[in-house]
Every structure is written in C-alpha cells, then in structure tokens.
Amino acid sequence: MQRVRFCDDAGWQPKLTGKNALRSWLQERGSLTARLKRQYADFSVQLAREAWRKPHLDETHLLRLPRATHAWVREVWLVGDGQPRVFAHSVIARTDLRGPWYGLRKIGRLPLGTALFANPEVTRGVLHFRQLNASHPLHKALSASFPVSRQQRLWARRSLFCLGRHHLLVTEVFLPSMLQHP
C-alpha cells in the first residue's frame, strides 16, 4: 500500500519515541486483523456500536468535514482468546460512504481490516501514535463498557485509508491485555 500523508495537530505523532512494550503492534504496517488472527486461535470481532454521529473535532479536521456534520462511526472490540485486545474506531464521511465504500455500513461483525487489505486499490496513510488519557473522547468511549482505570494511559494509533477520492479514518486503541503478548 502507498503512503498517504495527512496533517495532524491534535497530539498525534508520526514517530514513536522511547521504549514501548507495544512497539511492534503499534508499528505494524500490515493488517492488524491478520496479525491478531495469527496470535490468537480464538479471534473475533464484537460490534460495540455503529451509527451516524458527530466525529471528534480532530477527526473532522482530518476528514475535512464541517464541524456540525455527522459521519458513519463504527466501534468494535477485537477479541483474542475471549478477551478484548483492541478497541477500533472508524469514521467515514457520508459523501465517502457512497461508491466504492458503500458496503462498509453493512459489514457488522466482519473485520474491516480484512476488507481494506484485500483491495489493492486501497492506500494507507502514515501511522500516527499517541497515548490517550482519561479526558480523550476515545478513552471515555471504551471505558464506558470496559474496565479501565482513569489513570491508565492507553496507546493508540491511527491512519487514513483512501480509495480514490474517498477517505476512511481508522483508530486502534491497544488495551492493557495486549501487554500479555507484546
């Protein structure tokens, strides 16, 4: 996949610095879904929620959306050996959901990564990383249904996937259980 660059001003960085027990997972350029399937014999996707919602402010900036607009937001748990390992959050604008991305609204519990990496026309942008604290909207979203301490900072990565002129932003938050298999 080719690299697509995007501007980011919300604390996301294009490089990991210092020691990080999750480095190999965070920097994985291939399909995270495929790697999780190799790591865990019992892998599944559990749909947390999907709906038309207002994206987070930094997401509207990246997707070049007006602030008040709604986008299709899908959140899932990537589960390995019966335990949530990754919280995945995807955002696609209404206009980008037409055409080649049309079917994404109906994938349900199917892994998004499988669909993205199976299509050679899909390009992936640069990975960006950051630690999420309890005030970050994604930390709040996952802690609403997953027991994580407010003091627990969680590593996340995100990238923009493109299919022609259509964009999809995917953010993956790595849960503490991932430290069992670095």
Image (cartoon, rainbow, N blue to C red):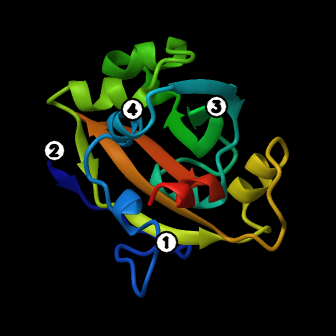
Q: Mark 2: which amino acid?
A: Met
Residue under circle 3? 82
* Residue 48: x %, y % from top left: 71, 29
Q: Residue 12 carries which label?
A: 1
Q: In the current view of this chain or complex, which residue is farthest to the bottom?
A: 18
In the rendered image, the quadrant that contains the N terminus is top left
Disc 2, SS: loop
Who comes first in sequence, dot 2 or dot 3? 2
Asked if disc 3 and disc 1 are in contact, CB closer than 8 Å, the reply is no
* Residue 151: x %, y % from top left: 81, 74
| Real-space CA distance between mark 2 and mark 3, rounded to the nearest whole angstrom | 31 Å
Residue under circle 2? 1
Disc 1, SS: loop
Q: How crowded is mark 2: few (under 14 residues within 10 Å), some or many (20 or more)?
A: some
| Real-space CA distance between mark 3 and mark 1, rounded to the nearest whole angstrom | 30 Å
Who comes first in sequence, dot 1 or dot 2? 2
* Residue 55 or residue 80, whichever sits in front: 80
